[in-house]
Image (cartoon, grey):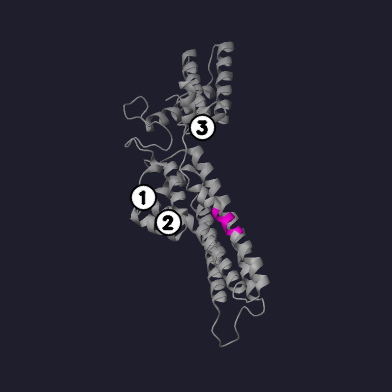
């Protein structure tokens, strides 16, 4: 009402104080919680608090509130009230944090996945599951948080731009490898296993490059950067047979195909090196390959280690088990 009819309306100091308290609460939530529910980032909340303080000071000095003040107060009130309504503020089933549903007490990104995704996840080297967790953190109850959505889309765009660069480099390496004398068979002869593996690497690199460009183009053409466009895009993409799982598979294709291109190139290189009978070459390359394969697999092995719960105090963290022992002493 104040936004449409700001004239001849008087605001007392209690309205400013109420809005200031709600902004302070949202600011504290954004700074202290990993999954805040506020409608703004912490930096924006700081600026809004300063703005409300300035308007409050103007009211105290002139004992009158201008129409611009009324419109600003109404817009802020409407934004905060809208988030409270969507998060069931004050209700028994209120949303307890970002990424949580009001219809379930389970954390959204910890929901079980279907057999479809489990099978595809193996072929795509575990990338769809990682993307599905990210999608379920920001797309909860068919709602999008503005600040988290902007961060997520910016990260996806940067990731796809990086994949286009890596795919181009990988494609150049594959073509250069085919130009090495003796790799490709003469015309009419059957190609070697190394050449076939390089062909597979070329196809994977080209597919990763094309899919990255298409996905980045979809973000621009559908205005997915904005919250409204993001809601329409996510609703259209997730309302199908497999929902958000199919979207996670699509987002993971550039990464997975690029990894398959690298693996195919490594296989081709091994098929060229190890068939030799030179003992010096084999004695040198076998331990080098073994060491580098172990170093490459180390992040995968580290990723599968069981997670250890930690108790966070200030800026430090330590295992809960150790904390319990300290308290017992």
Q: CA distance from mark 3 to mark 1?
A: 31 Å
Q: For numbered disc 2, what is the local secondary structure? A: helix
Mark 3, residue position: 40
Residue 28 at x, y percent in the picture: 51, 24
Residue shown at the point (42%, 56%) measured from the top left: 121
Q: Secondary structure at mark 1?
A: loop
Between label 3 and label 2, give the one nearer the viewer.
Answer: 2
Q: Position of residue 94 (x, y in %)?
A: 35, 29
In percent of the image, x 49 and y 42: which residue is there? Answer: 149
Q: Secondary structure at mark 3?
A: loop
User: Circle 1 sits on which residue?
Assistant: 113
Start-end of magenta stretch: 291-297
Q: Nearer the viewer, residue 185 or 163?
A: 185
- CB atoms of marks 3 and 2 within 8 Å: no
Q: Position of residue 235 (x, y in %)?
A: 39, 48
Residue at mark 2:
121
Identify the mark nearer the N-term, 1 or 2: 1
C-beta proximity under 8 Å, tags 3 and 1 = no
Can you say which quadrant of the picture contains the N terminus? Answer: top left
Q: Earlier in the sequence, mark 3 or mark 2?
A: 3
- What is the spatial separation of the Cα atoms under label 1 and label 2, in whole angstroms? 10 Å
Mark 3 or mark 1, whichever is nearer to me: 1
Residue lying at 49% horizontally and 16% vertically, measured from the top left: 17
């Amino acid at each position: 009402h104040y936004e449409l009819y700001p004239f001849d309306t008087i605001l007392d100091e209690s309205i400013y104080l109420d809005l200031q308290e709600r902004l302070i609460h949202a600011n504290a939530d954004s700074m202290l919680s990993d999954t805040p529910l506020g409608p703004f980032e912490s930096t924006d909340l700081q600026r809004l608090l300063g703005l409300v303080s300035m308007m409050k000071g103007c009211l105290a000095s002139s004992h009158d509130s201008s129409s611009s003040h009324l419109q600003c107060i109404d817009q802020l009130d409407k934004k905060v009230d809208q988030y409270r309504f969507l998060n069931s503020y004050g209700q028994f089933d209120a949303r307890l944090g970002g990424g949580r549903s009001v219809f379930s007490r389970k954390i959204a990104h910890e929901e079980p996945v279907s057999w479809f995704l489990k099978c595809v996840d193996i072929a795509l080297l575990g990338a769809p599951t990682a993307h599905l967790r990210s999608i379920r953190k920001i797309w909860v109850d068919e709602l999008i948080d503005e600040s988290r959505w902007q961060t997520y889309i910016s990260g996806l765009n940067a990731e796809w731009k990086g994949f286009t660069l890596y795919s181009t480099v990988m494609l150049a390496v594959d073509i250069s490898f085919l130009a090495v004398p003796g790799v490709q068979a003469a015309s009419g002869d059957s190609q070697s296993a190394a050449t076939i593996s390089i062909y597979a690497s070329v196809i994977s690199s080209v597919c990763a490059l094309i899919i990255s460009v298409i996905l980045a183009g979809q973000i621009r053409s559908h205005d997915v950067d904005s919250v409204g466009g993001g809601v329409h895009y996510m609703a259209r993409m997730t309302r199908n047979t497999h929902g958000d799982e199919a979207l996670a598979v699509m987002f993971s294709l550039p990464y997975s195909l690029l990894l398959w291109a690298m693996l195919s190139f490594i296989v081709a290189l091994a098929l060229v090196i190890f068939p030799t009978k030179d003992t010096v070459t084999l004695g040198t390359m076998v331990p080098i390959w073994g060491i580098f394969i172990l170093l490459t697999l180390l992040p995968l092995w580290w990723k599968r280690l069981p997670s250890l719960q930690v108790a966070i105090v200030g800026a430090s963290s330590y295992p809960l088990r150790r904390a319990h022992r300290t308290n017992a002493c």
